[in-house]
Amino acid sequence: LAAELVAGGGRAYAVGGGLHHGMATHANGFCFLNDLVFAIRRLRSLGIQRIAYVDLDAHHCDGVEAAFEDDNDLLMVSTHEEVRWPFTGMLEDNIKERLVNIPLPKACNDDEFLSAVDQIVLPVIRRFVPEALIIQGGADALCEDPLSRMCLSNNALWCTFSNLLELSDRVILTGGGGYNPWTVARLW
């Protein structure tokens, strides 16, 4: 539905989405189905081919990457905590201008995160010139989340969302990970 709502232009927020670990043949992590893969495929069926996918969750988007590993019309950018489950998304996996993994150190703070966004994420998306943008906005990179050791505030994520929204007139934002109910509720 989000893909259909933004196909002609606009924004949709799918708060319950962002299940980026689901694989084609099996559930993975806490993700039974991968709604992000479905959204990308639905946008494609609606004639939107060039899509940028940005994953801000503390965990790497292994299910989305597996589904589109050979797709030159999809730019995948993932900021995630290094050496964190599912232990994928290494720098050496990067493919110039198509797959950009940004493993961040434990205790990564707002300044460090925003520096990576300003110097890497935004420029690569601008060069790609997407027809649509999908953002997985997981809350598990926030301080006090029990399943990561990153230390971001809402301010860093809201600043990132604001900057990303300027890069396309078709945007889907999803929820995603987040295992502290108080920090998730504040972000959402």
Image (cartoon, rainbow, N blue to C red):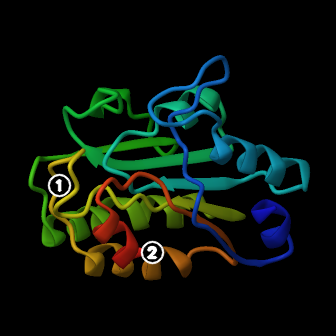
Residue wearing tag 1: 150
Local packing at callout 2 (Cα closer than 10 Å; few below 14, some 14-19, many 20+) is few
Look at the numbered disc 1 and give the secondary structure of its residue: loop
- Disc 2 residue type? Trp
Q: Residue at x 67, y 23 (%)?
A: 24
Look at the numbered disc 2 and give the secondary structure of its residue: loop
Q: Residue at x 85, y 64 (%)?
A: 4
Q: Quadrant of residue 81?
A: top left
Q: Which mark is residue 121?
A: none
In the displayed structure, does residue 176 sit left or right of residue 185? right
Q: Quadrant of residue 16?
A: bottom right
- Disc 1 residue type? Met
Is 152 located above or below residue 85 in the figure? below
Local packing at callout 1 (Cα closer than 10 Å; few below 14, some 14-19, many 20+) is many
Q: Residue at x 57, y 37 (%)?
A: 64
The residue most toward the top is 25
Is 182 located above or below residue 80 in the figure? below
Along the line of sight, the residue nearer the viewer: 18 or 9: 18
Q: Position of residue 46 (x, y in %)?
A: 90, 56
Q: Which mark is residue 188?
A: 2
Whichever of labels 1 and 2 marks the residue nearer the N terminus, that label is 1
